[in-house]
Amino acid sequence: MRVIKIGGNVVDSVERRASVLDAIATNGLPTVLVHGGGKLATELAERLNVPQTLVDGRRITDAETLRIVTMVYGGLVNKTLVAELQARGVNAIGLTGADGNLMLAHRRVHAERDYGFVGDVDAVNVALLTMLAEAGYTVVCAPLTHDGKGTLLNTNADTIAREIAVALSATTETELSYIFEHEGVLRDVNDASSAFVQLSRAQAQAYAANGVITAGMLPKLENAFAAAERGVRRVRITRWDALDGGTLIV
């Protein structure tokens, strides 16, 4: 099983998006595609005059913002990806965490900040994903979960990809790929060819302490290391046109 996560810089680019979807259509592996889409949500919020606050890349989600991200993530972005996969002969189905009880979460509790309707994943419905994979479906997963009490929750897509991959790895060999705009984790942000071939947690901590790995990469790396440490067979961070390349997390 393969879990692929694509961020906003891939979602927003026709070329990059097409490259990933072409790879899904040809690789033959049962796939779960997890997507972000933050830029579109921010643009819609600006049009609707709904102020936005991001802390360490995480969107504070009040009631109005929840409505916006639900429309964008669960609607426009998700269904566009589903339609584009169908055009490639891939039978895809788009889901949020509420559909089929795919992902149950709780509202984040933080000592210093109220994140609003932001969720942290508690459980993944592996039986549903397995059933859909066996029926030939590629699942396209929006970064929305639910609390089991009727409330949707905005949930970080990198974390969702991690939790899905970890849950699936309990019953099947699973690969997790974080796809973005760079070749991998870079030694030098100004040199696109400087990606690490592989990276351990200890190495990453040392490079981060020396300023080689920038703060913006650290949350993605934490999700990647957590996935590898919790049983996902292969985890990589790579570019949109090199799904089997990039930086291997060891």
Image (spheres, grey):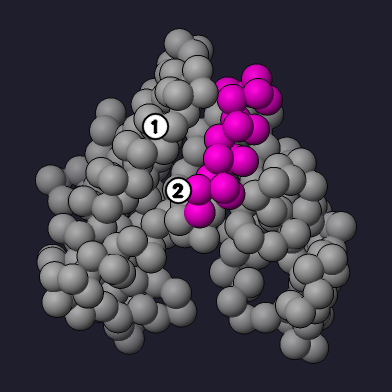
Secondary structure mostly seen in magenta is helix
Question: Is residue 226 or residue 139 the one in the foreground?
Answer: 139
Dot 2 alpha-carbon crowd within 10 angstroms: few under 14, some 14 to 19, many 20 or more: many
Badge 2 marks a residue whose secondary structure is: strand
Q: Can you give x and y, in whole percent of width and height, for residue 163 in the image?
A: 50, 46
Question: Is residue 74 or residue 233 the one in the foreground?
Answer: 74
Q: Is residue 29 above or below residue 113?
A: above
Asked whether residue 184 is in view, the answer is yes
Residue that carries the numbered disc 2 in the rendered image: 35
Dot 1 alpha-carbon crowd within 10 angstroms: few under 14, some 14 to 19, many 20 or more: many
Q: Is residue 93 magenta?
A: no
- Magenta part of the protein: which range? 13-30
Q: Can you give x and y, in whole percent of width and height, for residue 226 in the image?
A: 63, 56
Quadrant assignment, res 193:
bottom right
Query: In the displayed structure, does residue 179 sit left or right of residue 117?
Result: right
Which marked residue is nearer to the observer: mark 2 or mark 1? 1
